Image (cartoon, rainbow, N blue to C red):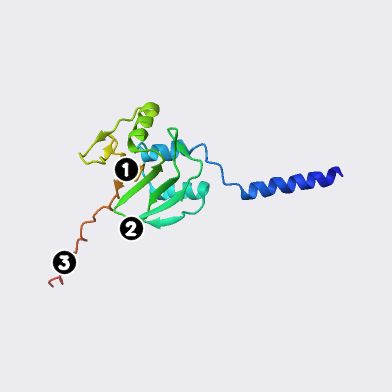
Amino acid sequence: MGGRWRLLLAAAVLAAQAGRVHAVPTTFGTIIGNGVLCRDHTDNLYFYDYLVKFFKEPYKHEGGAFWFKTDGATLWGITIPEVMVSDDTSPYIFVGAVAEAPPEDLEKAIIAQVGHHYTRIDTSAYPVRESKPASRIVYFDTRSKIYCAKFKPMPPVQPPAVQMPPARPRAK
């Protein structure tokens, strides 16, 4: 009888693990947090691969970005339900996150935990906030988005090839 209970218990554990959402990796705050704060190199392929590895394929592709559901993720104590990474159609390389808090609360949480300050760069009713390394916080309905965007590096311009004049026949 003990063998049957062990088999049932093992089957129940496997079923629970199969249906379980992957746990948020312990590196999420370091990788994504530093990415959206512009504290690291911004490489959309790196972030895309990281997100696919831990959160599966993107659930949508729009606005020049791949969007990933990040159930259970937090940054600076604030829930982060989605992360987006630029595709190659955008003139920017970016990584961003949706925060379940208004920009004022997200900014306060970042200041409290990281010491990273933001400045309002416009005087609209919904001002954009920007930090020295160029990270931005913007309104996203009742929530906010935080992102780091950089221009794509352009390949170096090669000078035109030097053409040698045709060889002249030698005088005899």
Compared with 94, 64 (above or below) is below
Q: Is 130 on the left or on the right of 71, as rendered?
A: left
First along the sequence among labels 1 and 3:
1
Residue that mark 1 sits on = 139
**From the viewer's perspective, is the residue at label 3 or at label 2 nearer?**
2
In the rendered image, the quadrant that contains the C terminus is: bottom left
Residue that mark 3 sits on = 165
**From the viewer's perspective, is the residue at label 2 or at label 1 nearer?**
1
> Splitting the image into 4 quarters, where does residue 163 fall?
bottom left
The x, y position of residue 159, in whole percent, is 21, 57
* Dot 2 crowding, Cα within 10 Å, few <14, some 14–19, many 20+: few
Could you say whether the residue bearing mark 3 is in a helix, strand or loop?
A: loop
Residue type at numbered disc 2: Thr
Instruction: Using the numbered discs, state the Cα–Cα distance from disc 3 to disc 2 in whole angstroms.
Output: 42 Å
Residue type at numbered disc 1: Tyr
Residue that mark 2 sits on = 89
Q: Residue at image x 41%, y 37%?
A: 33
Residue type at numbered disc 3: Pro
Compared with 115, 1 (above or below) is below
**From the viewer's perspective, is the residue at label 1 or at label 3 nearer?**
1
Compared with 169, 7 (above or below) is above
Q: Residue at image x 46%, y 37%?
A: 74
Q: Could you tell me if the residues under marks 1 and 3 are in contact, i.e. CB atoms within 8 Å?
A: no
